[in-house]
């Protein structure tokens, strides 16, 4: 087929789109419960915004779709929702702070295509702008955990680290400042390419062997949060990053989700704009992280000229749906409840009136608009997986009745027209 979707993009038929919509509705409800407000921004940004220093980093920019418009201006498709948020905040200096927003939009990256990884995909973010407190980071993590639990997830882990800690470790190891960011990027690939792969990357960066061994030993430390924090204090001292981690973990213990959190010193997060706590949520099922984010206190200043602290997390909707599919998590979303079928042309207006009555009662109802015979209408309803068909016939109408056919059980019963709304409301909750 020469008209298949472009590589890295995908069509979502109704049965899949309904599931996606249910997931998004669940997330929105949780976000709004936590006080986050909806925001939409343009899918197009100027190249000046997308390529601003530290906004994405060289790896992301290589994957960014960009082109010149008819006026010769270089623009691009957004690759995440954090940079547009930073630009929005800079353009609206009178926003009451802290500003808490959620945003769900399509983004684009020309990267490798794999399961749960497309080139056009939904990004779903929550962010808090205008607070330096670790309370803001804690609330982001608690909201993310609550949202995943509402979706039916149980066994997942929140990996936690701090970019300040990583930078201190790298500098303590003797890496020159010019190479710190490159070394962090290499460490960030530990889960993907393994220890030997990271060693090769660090070797290409001409990092001394003893430095490589020290770094890999440190990032491999495992234990309780207290054990890892105590180790860090002995290794790098009581630096700000360790203090922030200790405070953040304290908040998470207080709200009862510490069992889902572990400090992982190998976590680096690839984007250059992170400045403090960073976090990823994974299920350990070989599909990568399903959510990730962190604190980025310097990004907005690139566009506004003033420092505005911020923190947030992004949910990988495609990956979440893949994991839910594998685990057969109940993602059923109500589709059409009833198909109203007219026996003949004589009662088509009556069928239309009945459909309107059902819809006013918030019952999803469909009507034949092709004037097909009854057999064809039943075939069509069956093909759409509609559970009930209300058959409107002249004889039944004269007695104030319709036939209600259960399409799964293949049984018909006569019900009063006045009772139909209540009956369907109970069967299609």
Image (cartoon, rainbow, N blue to C red):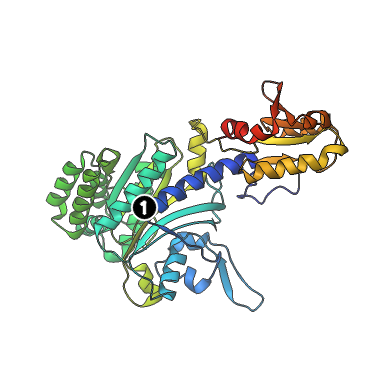
Which image quarter holds the C terminus?
top right
Residue 145 position, x and y percent, is 36, 44
Q: Label 1: state its secondary structure.
A: loop
The answer to whether any part of residue 209 appears in the image is yes
Which residue ends up furthest to the front in the rendered image?
A: 399
Instruction: Classify 10 Å Cα crowding around label 1: few (below 14), some (14-19), many (20 and above).
Output: some
Residue 93 image-quadrant placement: bottom left
Q: Is residue 190 depicted above or below 337 in this figure?
A: below
Residue 388 horizontal side relative to residue 159, left or right: right
Residue 33 horizontal side relative to residue 117, left or right: left
Q: Is residue 380 depicted above or below 300 in this figure?
A: above
| Residue at 47% over, 66% down | 84
Residue 413 position, x and y percent, is 70, 22
Viewer-closest of 151 and 266: 151
The residue carrying mark 1 is 34
| Residue at 85% over, 40% down | 371
Which image quarter holds the N terminus?
top right
Residue 356 image-quadrant placement: top right
Residue 258 image-quadrant placement: top left
């Amino acid at each position: 087929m020469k008209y298949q979707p472009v590589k890295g993009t995908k069509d979502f038929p109704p049965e899949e789109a309904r599931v996606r919509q249910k997931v998004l509705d669940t997330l929105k409800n949780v976000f709004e419960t936590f006080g986050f407000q909806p925001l939409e921004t343009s899918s197009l940004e100027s190249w000046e915004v997308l390529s601003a220093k530290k906004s994405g980093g060289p790896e992301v920019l290589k994957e960014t779709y960009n082109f010149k418009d008819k006026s010769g201006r270089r623009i691009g498709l957004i690759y995440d929702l954090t940079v547009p948020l930073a630009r929005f905040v800079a353009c609206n200096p009178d926003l009451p702070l802290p500003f808490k927003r959620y945003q769900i939009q399509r983004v684009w990256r020309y990267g490798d295509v794999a399961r749960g990884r497309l080139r056009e995909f939904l990004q779903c973010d929550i962010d808090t702008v205008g607070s330096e407190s670790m309370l803001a980071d804690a609330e982001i993590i608690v909201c993310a955990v609550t949202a995943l639990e509402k979706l039916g997830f149980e066994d997942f882990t929140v990996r936690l680290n701090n970019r300040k800690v990583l930078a201190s470790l790298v500098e303590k190891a003797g890496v020159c400042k010019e190479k710190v960011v490159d070394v962090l990027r290499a460490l960030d690939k530990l889960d993907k390419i393994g220890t030997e792969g990271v060693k090769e990357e660090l070797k290409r960066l001409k990092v001394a062997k003893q430095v490589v061994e020290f770094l890999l030993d440190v990032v491999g430390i495992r234990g309780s949060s207290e054990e890892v924090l105590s180790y860090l204090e002995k290794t790098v001292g009581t630096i700000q990053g360790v203090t922030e981690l200790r405070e953040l973990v304290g908040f998470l213990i207080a709200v009862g989700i510490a069992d889902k959190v572990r400090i992982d010193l190998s976590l680096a997060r690839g984007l250059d704009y992170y400045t403090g706590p960073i976090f990823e949520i994974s299920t350990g099922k070989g599909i990568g992280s399903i959510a990730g984010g962190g604190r980025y206190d310097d990004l907005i200043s690139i566009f506004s000229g003033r420092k505005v602290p911020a923190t947030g997390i992004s949910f990988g909707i495609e990956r979440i749906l893949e994991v839910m599919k594998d685990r057969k998590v109940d993602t059923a979303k109500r589709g059409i409840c009833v198909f109203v079928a007219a026996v003949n042309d004589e009662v088509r207006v009556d069928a239309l009136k009945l459909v309107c009555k059902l819809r006013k009662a918030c019952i999803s109802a469909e009507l034949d608009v092709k004037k097909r015979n009854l057999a064809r209408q039943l075939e069509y309803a069956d093909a759409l997986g509609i559970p009930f068909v209300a058959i409107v016939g002249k004889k039944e109408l004269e007695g104030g009745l319709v036939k209600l056919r259960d399409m799964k059980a293949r049984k018909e019963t006569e019900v009063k027209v006045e009772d139909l709304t209540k009956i369907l409301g109970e069967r299609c909750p």
